[in-house]
Image (cartoon, rainbow, N blue to C red):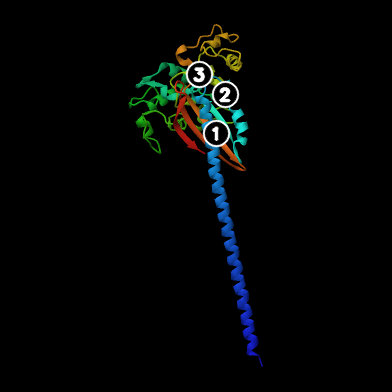
Amino acid sequence: MINPMSNNRGVALVLVILMIGVIVAVTIQLNRSARSGIYEGANMRDAIRLTYVAKSGFYGGQALLNEDTNSYDSLNEEWAEADFLSAASGSFFDKGHFRLNIEDESGKIPLNKLISGNNYNSDVENLLLRFLALPEFDLTDQEVEDIVDSIKDWIDEDDEVTGFGAEAIYYESLDEPYECKNAPLDCVEELLMVKGVSEKLLYGTDEQPGIGQYCSVYGEGKININTASKLVLRALSDEVTEEMADGMDAYRRDEDNDLSRSTWYKDVSGMDAVTIDGGIITTTSNFFTITSTGYLGEMRKSLSGVVKRDRDSHSSKLLSWKVE
């Protein structure tokens, strides 16, 4: 005969085991949730800290520009050699450091100055034609002219097609139509919407440079020959060869040379007979891109902004801002 008490004890044992299992599961989940909350809080704390580390680098770069007292701008100045500030940044914070880079936008081709009213600004037009015709970009003469015309049509206010450029009728006939902007470029990446400009041309490849890094939507129409890349230097005149551009780059990096005159290039070996139109070159700059990347352990955050500097008031105005 089966003892009823034995059955009750068995049921009680099963219930106890089930309750213990539930309690263990709940405890593990609560522990996991608590740890997740702690980690999320720590990550949020570190993200906030990282943002301020990066901002500190940005404002440090802005201070370098504001305190620049030279009558000209060159690659030998503190703002252009900001590695010293990046190297010291680790001592500014309990945790983290930043890496700072400042780039002169006036050393690039000012695309929005391609027109004056609805007509070509001939100085910038010829500069852009020579630049795109450089062998590095592998464009035919016709492709070069068509792209320049298309950029003009994109930013001028009228609807008249320039040469083999493109206005509304072209863009509205595409498989995915859109309007012709007929206004200044907001960013260099906007060139991808312009007829003839491909991603390969804009961004380049491992074998070929892209035009994007040499162009700007900022600037006042002149190129600072103290800071321009060697490709842009070669576009300043049909007479400037690759070897001459190398010589100009070496000359301007020598701190003993006077770079306050825009005609210093004539002191470079072999360039005494070369003439660069004085209307397209300068030795001063007003627009700069400051990029500061904050690091904290394996985390990183980059802040980038374009500022316009007022040399007289030792101040600068933020024109655009990007967080990566």
Left or right, residue 304 beside residue 13: left
The residue wearing badge 2 is 78
- Of labels 2 and 3, the one closer to you: 2
The amino acid on which the numbered mark 3 sits, given as a three-letter code, is Asn
Q: Nearer the viewer, residue 264 or 175?
A: 264
Please give the name of the residue rendered at 40% of the width and 36% of the height, measured from the top-left corner. 174
Helix, strand or loop status at disc 1: helix
Q: Point out the image quarter for the N terminus.
A: bottom right
Query: Residue 25: x, y in percent?
Result: 60, 66
Q: Nearer the viewer, residue 128 or 79?
A: 79
The residue wearing badge 3 is 224
Q: Is residue 322 above or below residue 270?
A: below
Query: Residue 236: x, y in percent?
Result: 50, 16
Please give the name of the residue rendered at 60% of the width and 74% of the height, measured from the top-left corner. 18
- Viewer can see residue 92: yes
The residue wearing badge 1 is 57
The amino acid on which the numbered mark 1 sits, given as a three-letter code, is Gly
Query: Residue 48: x, y in percent?
Result: 53, 44
Mark closer to the chain start, 2 or 3: 2
